[in-house]
Amino acid sequence: MKKWSLLLAVYFCICLLAACAAAGSGVPVPGGVPSNEEQSGGESAQPASVTTVCRVVSNDGSLLLAGMDGDPNIYILAPENDTNLAAGTLVEVTYKGAILETWPAQFSQVTEVHTVEGGFDDRCALYLQVLEDLWEVDAGLNGDLTYLGADLSRTSLSDSERAAVAWAFAGRHGGELVTGTWEELAEQGYIDRENLYWEDGVLFSITEKEEPVYFMPEGMAAVTFDAQKWRSGLGAYSFCDCTSVQSANGHWDGYSIGSEAIS
């Protein structure tokens, strides 16, 4: 009996050693597949392609993209993948790697960038231009700037488009971006609520209005809005009752200012 027990123990040890050797050499063992290899020939498994739809927000040497279809992310597409696409264009980006967790995020191993037919809308570019125009007027309000605040929450842009416009604008002027309404930034301690003053920042905001625009040509759309930059109760500049018209192909052709106000 002892002899049979000894023989069984030796047999199981030999089987275990054989299985370990097979796994270490890449030879399939019962019930498993060697890591990073396909069953059919031992070739490295290729990552599956993924396609995501984005809108081009700006093109300043590399493409700044806003995720679409509920994707809240914004992306930078490296210059080697830049196909000179205009702001407002809808694109499909196909990639095989991961999404790098930078801000903005980046695609790795991009294989294709395709324009999506239809869906062109360059309202992001329109609002970037409005913010740039506000920056230029009453430039003294921009002095000694550490923070650049942006509030686009009262526009029809998606969350990702708002984030992309704010990031692009802050990047052009070297301010540390903070986003939120006046109340939110005061609550967070950026704005001195009691003295109505932001010592080291300026808040830029755009507010769309529901006022109708009459006598629009067929196939055209329009938006009315106010825009403001605010440093203090006695230091602010506003564009009031602005209007922009969108053509049938989705292009917003500049904007007109109803009046300007300074305080």
Image: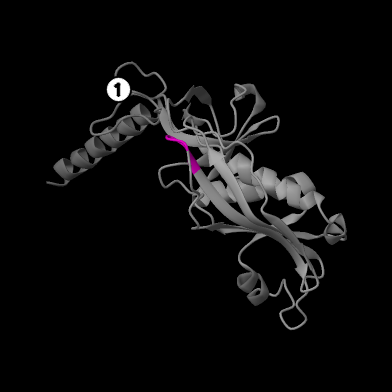
Is residue 152 left or right of 170 when viewed as pictured? left
At x 59% / y 25%, what residue is drawn?
85
Label 1 environment density (alpha carbons within 10 Å; few <14, some 14–19, many ≥20) = few
| Rendering coords of residue 151 (x, y %) | 62, 60
At x 16% / y 47%, what residue is drawn?
2
Q: Can residue 209 be seen in this view?
A: yes
At x 48% / y 43%, what residue is drawn?
215
Within the magenta stretch, is there residue 261?
Answer: no
Farthest residue to the left: give it: 1
Is residue 158 left or right of 177 when viewed as pictured? left
At x 29% / y 18%, what residue is drawn?
40
Which secondary structure type mostly characterizes the magenta part of the structure?
loop
Above or below, 229 relative to 164: below
The disc labelled 1 sits on which kind of residue?
Answer: Gln
| Rendering coords of residue 257 (x, y %) | 68, 50
Farthest residue to the bottom: give it: 194
Q: Can residue 100 be seen in this view?
A: no
Above or below, 43 relative to 36: above
Task: State which quadrant residue 147 falls in.
Answer: bottom right
Task: State which quadrant residue 48 falls in.
Answer: top left
| Rendering coords of residue 158 (x, y %) | 49, 49
Magenta range? 217-221
Is residue 11 left or right of 53 when viewed as pictured? left
Which quadrant: the C terminus?
Answer: bottom right
Farthest residue to the front: give it: 215
Secondary structure beneath label 1: loop
Q: Name the residue under label 1.
A: 39
| Rendering coords of residue 163 (x, y %) | 58, 50
In-front residue for pair 100/73? 73
Within the magenta stretch, is there residue 218?
Answer: yes
In-front residue for pair 17/24? 24
